[in-house]
């Protein structure tokens, strides 16, 4: 999960694509295989580096991707420091995803990987 978060962060820091299907593009950035991407984006696409997603990882990744704009930032440069968890909770509610301790753990792994990816791109 941490590696998936890192791959996502490295992708979103690049120039925006003109793709109409941002969710499928983010799934590709995560390196998800076609079946998992189809579950997340409802449009199976081919992916360069398949990363099998376990069934219990689909909901955390779906929520993480839906919260792409919910980062807390610090300093004048607006460096991402972590997810805005009240906004994440509201997003989970809207998506019908149950907030559980396991979901929080999974999100924290994705978040840690994303922060590593952001730091590498800034370094």
Image (cartoon, grey):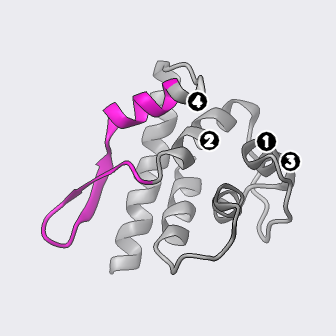
Which residue sits at x=33%, y=81%? 123
Please name the residue that numbered disc 2 is placed on. 62
Distance of mark 4 from mark 1, alpha carbons? 14 Å
Please name the residue that numbered disc 1 is placed on. 39
Crowding at mark 1 (Cα within 10 Å: few <14, some 14-19, many 20+): some
Q: Which residues are magenta?
A: 69-93
Residue 20 position by quadrant: bottom right
Distance of mark 3 from mark 1, alpha carbons? 6 Å
Residue 65 percent location from the top left of the image: 56, 49
Circles 4, 2 touching at the beta carbon (< 8 Å) = yes
Q: Is residue 113 left or right of residue 46?
A: left
- Closer to the camera in the image, 40 or 20: 20
Dot 4 or dot 1, earlier in sequence: 1
- Residue 88 part of the magenta segment: yes
Dot 3 or dot 2, earlier in sequence: 3
Residue 31 percent location from the top left of the image: 70, 61
Q: Nearer the viewer, mark 3 or mark 1?
A: 1
Crowding at mark 3 (Cα within 10 Å: few <14, some 14-19, many 20+): some
Please name the residue that numbered disc 3 is placed on. 35
Q: In the picture shown, does residue 20 fall above or below 71?
A: below
Dot 4 or dot 2, earlier in sequence: 2
């Amino acid at each position: 999960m941490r590696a998936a978060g890192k791959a996502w962060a490295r992708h979103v820091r690049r120039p925006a694509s003109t793709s109409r299907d941002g969710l499928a593009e983010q799934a590709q950035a995560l390196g998800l295989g076609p079946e998992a991407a189809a579950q997340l984006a409802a449009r199976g696409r081919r992916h360069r580096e398949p990363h099998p997603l376990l069934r219990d990882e689909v909901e955390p990744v779906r929520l993480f991707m839906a919260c792409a704009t919910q980062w807390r930032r610090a300093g004048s440069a607006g460096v991402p420091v972590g997810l805005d968890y009240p906004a994440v909770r509201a997003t989970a509610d809207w998506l019908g995803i149950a907030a559980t301790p396991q979901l929080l753990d999974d999100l924290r792994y994705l978040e840690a990987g994303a922060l590593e990816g952001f730091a590498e791109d800034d370094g």
